Image (cartoon, rainbow, N blue to C red):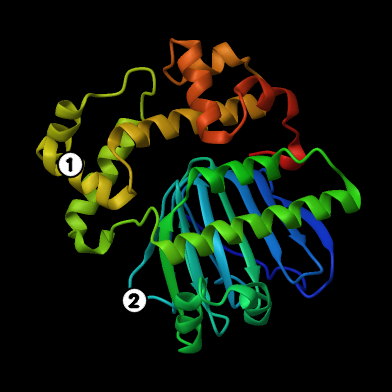
Amino acid sequence: MRTIQLATVPDRTQASSSFKVNLPPSIGKGGVSVDAFASGLQLRIIDAKLDQITTIKGDASGFEVGVGFCLAGFFESRSGCSKNPVYCEPNLSGFFFFPELMDATIKVACQPMMYAVIGMETETLFGIVERDEQRSLSVLKKLEKNDPFIIPDALTPAMRRAFQQIFNCPFSGPIRQLFLEGKLMELLAHKLDQLHSGKAPIRNPYSLKPKDIERVRHAADLLVSDLENPPDMSTLARSVGLSRSTLYRHFNQLYNLSPFEYLRNHRLQTAMHLLQEGEVNVTEAAITVGYLNMSHFAKAFKAMFGIPPSAFLNHSTPAQSI
């Protein structure tokens, strides 16, 4: 396992700017993109695949408050804001508050990773929610305590569709900045509504014993190790020493997904990356990840990403890759 030190992100107070830093080939593929806006919002997207399990050390976020979205991949984060490690899995999002900059250690798995953060200062958030304080009351009360926290929750289909539109933004220049900033506001609205209404809550994985967490994560690895011929639930449960019902319950508790949903999402995310690389067509991508019915594949793909796989293939570009 390798350890690297993450350099400090350039000054976030600059009004409107965009840049991307690519990973050196000796570490892996992909990179980190940053878009800053005059409103005080900043979007950071990590789109990468490391060639080995890597521990990254650096500051926790660089912002006081924000929302993180895990669209693909897995990492484990430890920082001064939480006594327990934070396990970030696909289809999770989290609202965070770090009143002081804290060191963080992130252990990243060796698989494609897509993680986005919308960051801002507390004053910027207050300015956004001041006209609807009632809906944002629960968040404002937690901020007033000035204690660091993370509120984990689900990544909803509406959030994922907004990201898909960000990744496939058809504009450039100032119009692109307006488009992206509007999408960030939309994502914040989805998150604040989720926090207010309690929609799509996730269960607390820390109620599971460490040994059970290890078993469930091993089951998840086995489930997606052969996408064309995945094991059935009985075989999977025997492989990790749990009953079918216990595995299903623990799996849902840790990932907020059933094993079938986890497999489906992994298949679609893998297909998405294959199409983005441009080396296969839609049919080949579908077959590679275990879909034999092209209609079912196209329907599932559109439900998850908001556009059909053919449109993604036509419009993907390295600058907005996922």
Which amino acid, mark 1?
A: Leu
Quarter of the figure with the C terminus: top right
Mark 1 / mark 2, whichever is N-terminal: 2
Q: Is residue 61 above or below residue 319?
A: below
Residue at the disc numbered 1? 247
CA distance for labels 1 and 2:
26 Å
Q: Indicate the position of residue 109 as horizontal and vertical percent values.
A: 45, 48
Q: Is residue 273 above or below residue 8?
A: above
Question: In the picture, residue 207 is in which quadrant?
Answer: bottom left
Disc 1 or disc 2, which is closer to the eye?
1
- Residue in view at x 84 percent, y 42 percent: 171
Question: In the picture, residue 39 is in which quadrant?
Answer: bottom right
Q: Secondary structure at mark 2?
A: loop
Q: Nearer the viewer, residue 321 or 164?
A: 164
Q: Is residue 122 above or below residue 265?
A: below
- Residue in view at x 64 percent, y 55 percent: 186
Which amino acid, mark 2?
A: Lys
> Please, which residue is most extreme toward the right here?
173
- Residue in view at x 52 percent, y 64 percent: 192
Q: Can residue 28 be seen in this snapshot? A: no
| Label 1 with label 2: CB-CB less than 8 Å | no
Q: Secondary structure at mark 1?
A: helix
Q: Can residue 310 be seen in this snapshot? A: yes
Residue at the disc numbered 2? 83
Q: Indicate the position of residue 291 as horizontal and vertical percent values.
A: 44, 16
Q: Nearer the viewer, residue 51 or 211?
A: 211
Q: Is residue 128 left or right of residue 223?
A: right
Q: Dot 2: within a 10 Å radius of its alpha carbon, few (fewer than 14), some, or many (20 or more) residues?
A: few
Q: Indicate the position of residue 57 as horizontal and vertical percent values.
A: 54, 67
